[in-house]
Each structure stands twice: as C-alpha cells, then as structure tokens.
C-alpha cells in the first residue's frame, strides 16, 4: 500500500480482540484493502459521532425519530477532499474515483446487488445475527458507547437486548433461521458454479456477507456456540468463506 489517502472513521471496541467489531465499518475495511488503498483510522465513540460528522461535513444517512441520524463508516478522501457516508455509497465512490483498482460493483450490478442485500441479506442473514449478538455488544464497547448502544437499541427494539434471544430455545430457533438462509445462499452459489456472489471475483455483496460473519465471530468469540454452529454448517463452508477475507483484515489503528 502507498501513503495513506483515506481517513476512515470507526467506533472502537474496548480491547484488542474486538477493537474492530462494527459490521458496517468492516465492509469498508475490506473494500479499502481489496482495492489496495492505504488508510488511517480515526476512532469516534458513539455519543460523539453526530458532532464529529457535522464538523467534517459528512451527510446524515437516515432519519430516526424525525431527526437526522449520523452513522459510521465515513471516509475522508484526502486526495479529493470528498467526505462520504454510508458503506454502499463509499464503495461506489471508491469504484468511481479509483477505476484502476478492483471494482466491487462491476458492470451494471450495483442496483442488483443493492436489491439482493436489502431483500435477502438484511432480513435473513443480518436480522438473526443482530438478535444473537446485540446483548453482547455493550460489554465490548467503552462505557459511554456501551451505554449509548444499549439505550438507543432498546428504544428501537422496544425491549431489553437480552430479550431479543433470551432463552436457549429462542436462540436455537434464531440460529436455525440463520442456517436456513445460509443454506439458500449456498444453493444459489452452487447453481452458479462460483464461490462468490460476484462470480470469480469478490463483489460488494460478498463483502457484506463476510462482514456479517466477522461481526458475529468477534462478538461471540471463536468458541461461541452460535458461531460454532455457523462454522460447522455445510462442512465448514462459511468458515472457509470468511477465511478467504483474512488477507484483507487491515487494522491501521
């Protein structure tokens, strides 16, 4: 990698083993590494995100309770001066700005990938993962961020984080929902004769799936029962899938 071009804004965990934990930011760490673009990290605690993003000129990414919501990841491209929020928009920007690097949205695939992520990955892969990891998250963050995460998420879900998959029976059902989704995903990949959703090359949709696995593994631990179920499923297919991405796990702390 060359001298850093990009500043990446991320939310820190409270220990080296889970310093990098956010699935949304993992997406862009993977994208930057795939493209070979050097970057530095600026760490921002949850309660400080809105003020810091306003300061650097980042756009809000959605509205919540009628107010603009500022989220991470955000990048600042020091070459162009451009600030971009939202992982999909960041990936598209980097494809456009650095066309000689591997593209995550090839041809006209951006709309198709976006639809696949919205209609399949988010409801069937990410949603059950949220239920499995949410209660583990506050303890992995620094105190201010942990409190912020718990308060905002419990307001959003209308229940305590521990209630999202509180009993062994509920957790088993949620794990099965996730495995059913991965079974369908594997079937589609087998039918295509390719290892990745992008065909022979990794696409942005692949990055989103891998980031979800990395998030789950980080927060539950290698020996977490739910992660072990995913690792063992389909003869370790999804553990191998994630392992392929290890070469792109750049910290730049």
Image (spheres, rainbow, N blue to C red):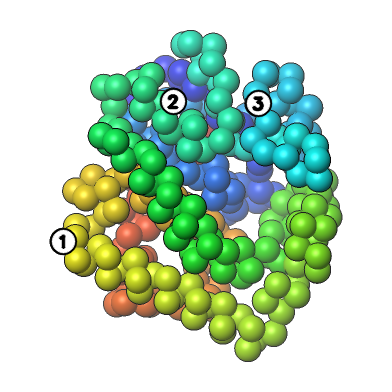
Q: Compute the Cα span from label 2 to label 3.
A: 14 Å
What residue lies at 42% left-to-right and 30% top-to-bottom?
A: 92
Calculate the distance from the C-alpha at mark 1 to the C-alpha at mark 2.
Answer: 30 Å
Q: Earlier in the sequence, mark 3 or mark 1?
A: 3
Q: Earlier in the sequence, mark 1 or mark 2?
A: 2
Helix, strand or loop under label 1: loop
Q: Are marks 1 and 2 in contact (CB under 8 Å)?
A: no
In the visual, does 94 lie left or right of 153? left
Q: Is residue 123 left or right of residue 151?
A: left
Q: Nearer the viewer, residue 133 or 113?
A: 113
Q: Are marks 3 and 1 in contact (CB under 8 Å)?
A: no
Secondary structure under the numbered disc 3 in the rendered image: loop
Along the horizontal axis of the image, is 177 left or right of 197?
Answer: right
* Image position of 246 with respect to 105: above or below: below
Expressed as whole percent of the image width and height from the top left, the position of residue 110 reads 37, 39
Label 2 element class: helix
User: Badge 1: how crowded within 10 Å, few (<14), some, or many (20+)?
Assistant: few
The residue sitting at 56% across, 83% down in the picture is 173
Picture residue at 40% right of the left edge, 53% below the top: 116
In the picture, which quadrant includes the N terminus? top left
* Residue designated by label 2: 93
In front of the other: 113 or 75? 113
Question: Looking at the picture, how far across and down is residue 129, in whole percent?
Answer: 56, 65
| Total count of labels | 3
**Disc 3 to disc 1, how far (Cα)?**
40 Å
Label located before the other in sequence (2 or 3): 3
* Residue in the picture at 81% in, 49% down: 148
* Marker disc for residue 59: 3
Q: Which mark is residue 193?
A: 1
Crowd band around label 2 with a 10 angstrom C-alpha radius: few (<14), some (14–19), many (20+):
some
Is 221 placed above or below 195 here?
A: below
């Amino acid at each position: 990698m060359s001298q850093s071009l990009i500043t990446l804004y991320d939310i820190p965990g409270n220990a080296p083993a889970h310093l990098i934990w956010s699935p949304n930011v993992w997406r862009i760490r993977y994208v930057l590494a795939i493209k070979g673009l050097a970057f530095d990290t600026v760490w921002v605690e949850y309660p400080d995100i809105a003020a810091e993003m306003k300061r650097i000129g980042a756009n809000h990414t959605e509205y919540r309770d009628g107010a603009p919501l500022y989220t991470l990841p955000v990048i600042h491209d020091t070459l162009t001066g451009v600030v971009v929020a939202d992982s999909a928009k960041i990936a598209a920007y980097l494809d456009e700005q650095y066309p000689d690097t591997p593209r995550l949205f090839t041809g006209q695939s951006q709309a198709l990938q976006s639809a696949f992520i919205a209609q399949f990955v988010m409801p069937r892969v990410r949603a059950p993962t949220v239920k499995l990891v949410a209660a583990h998250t506050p303890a992995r963050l620094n105190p201010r961020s942990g409190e912020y995460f718990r308060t905002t998420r419990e307001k959003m879900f209308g229940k305590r984080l521990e209630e999202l998959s509180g009993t062994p029976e509920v957790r088993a059902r949620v794990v099965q929902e996730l495995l059913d989704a991965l079974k369908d995903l594997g079937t589609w990949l087998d039918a295509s004769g390719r290892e990745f959703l992008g065909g022979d090359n990794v696409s942005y949709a692949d990055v989103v799936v891998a980031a979800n696995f990395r998030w789950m593994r980080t927060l539950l631990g290698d020996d977490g029962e739910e992660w072990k179920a995913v690792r063992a499923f389909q003869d370790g297919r999804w553990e191998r899938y994630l392992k392929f991405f290890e070469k792109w796990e750049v910290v730049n702390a």
